[in-house]
Image (tube, grey):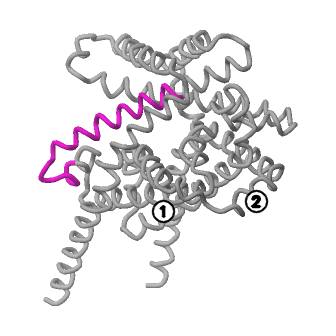
Amino acid sequence: MEQQKAKLAKVVWPATLTVASVLFGWHAGGGFATGNQANQFYVITGWFGPLSALLALLLLTLVVREAMIMYNRNHMTSYKQLFETLYHPFDKLELVFEVYFYIMILMAISASIAGSGQLLQDIASISYPVAVSVVGVVLLVLTMFGAELVRKASTIMTALILVTAVCIFIIGITQKKDVIVQIFQAGPTWRHLPLAILKTFQYAGFQCAAIPTMIAVGTVLATPKDSKKSMWIAFALSSLVLCLSVVMLLGWSAVYGAVEGGSTIPTLTVAKQLGSPLLIIAYYVCLFLCFVSTAVAAIFGVAGRFSGIKAFSRIRNEKTRSALLSSAVMLISMGVSLVGLTNIIKYGYGYCGYVGIAFIVIPFLTVGVYKNRKAEKAVRMADEAQHGA
């Protein structure tokens, strides 16, 4: 018996770590590494920032945990089934998630183009619209001819930008530790508390776009206990890097806030002040490649999903159909990206966050918890009855 438990533990722990790393990778990608999200959602609340970040990630991991438990227990095969079960008897509300999900993908592509364009503008000293156009052409070519290669490299890109960003965070905190200490010694500004609470839920709300990915990879988790372990690991990892980012940006907010355009990619603005050319180059390269890999993977995924729709099935040549769909997604995303990275995160992610609060976070943490506990109780009673017989 003990040997069986030991064997099971050897199988379960790699699975829990793998699933946790997927959520960590989803959260700690290029968008996170810019510092724009942390600045708009947490730094603006001052002293409450790190605490608000912790609570947001706690909400996110709790929601994903309940989603995976419901998905696995009912042996589902799509996120559509998951949300129909969650909303039952109001199954059609699932369409709200469909709309939310595709808007979030569009925002992610647009943010990647905007971020890449901002980097290119900074390096080449060209206008932002021209930079966005260049990025758009590069992405379209890669989507049509090199999507598989880019997708394979995306994990490496995420890891590299994460390492580079964490180095900037740690050095940045060290250089501004006196300012950071003063902020926390001064104590909270209580009028910021309502905003901090709102931003906590809003951040968790738009990050819930990770659910379709997480339930797909989470099928390897055999029991609810495994799902819980995995999400606690994801919470610990994500909290560490996000809080490092928030604390560092709190110390430097007066610096990047005084630079024109410094708040668009505040981590880059800080990196330029640290006196390490190698770190700046590494950040430029890694962030640009990370943005490109994110955008290509998302465009390829959307084009693949819609290529089977009846309206497009008339185009018999698969490559032509894929190229047309990719071009359409690219043009829409480029149009959105022209409003700039800051506005995409503030309004695009922000309003999706409100939808996420109402239709994902609250339902999963109330109705979802109730339905999961009810199902768990039914299974337990059935087992007891079987053993009793």
Above-or-below relation of 273 to 382: above
Cα separation, mark 2 vs mark 1, equals 33 Å
Asked if residue 267 lies left or right of residue 310, the reply is right
Could you tell me which secondary element the residue under label 1 belongs to? helix
Considering the image in quadrants, where does the C terminus appear?
bottom left
Span colored in magenta: 84-111
Q: Residue furthest right?
A: 275
Q: Amino acid type of disc 2? A: Val
Considering the image in quadrants, where does the N terminus appear?
bottom left
Above-or-below relation of 203 to 133: below
- Identify the mark nearer the N-term, 2 or 1: 2
Q: Which residue is drawn at 44% across and 55% down?
A: 60
**Quadrant assignment, res 220:** bottom left
Could you tell me which secondary element the residue under label 2 belongs to? helix
Tag 2 residue: 181
Q: What is the magenta segment's predominant secondary structure?
A: helix
Q: Amino acid type of disc 1? A: Ser
Asked if residue 208 lies left or right of residue 196, the reply is left
Q: Position of residue 170 (x, y in %)?
A: 76, 51
Tag 1 residue: 230
Label 2 Cα neighbours within 10 Å, binned few <14 / some 14-19 / many ≥20: few
Above-or-below relation of 320 to 231: above
Q: Where is residue 32 in the image (x, y as percent from the top left)?
A: 59, 41
Q: Residue at x 16, y 90 (%)?
A: 388
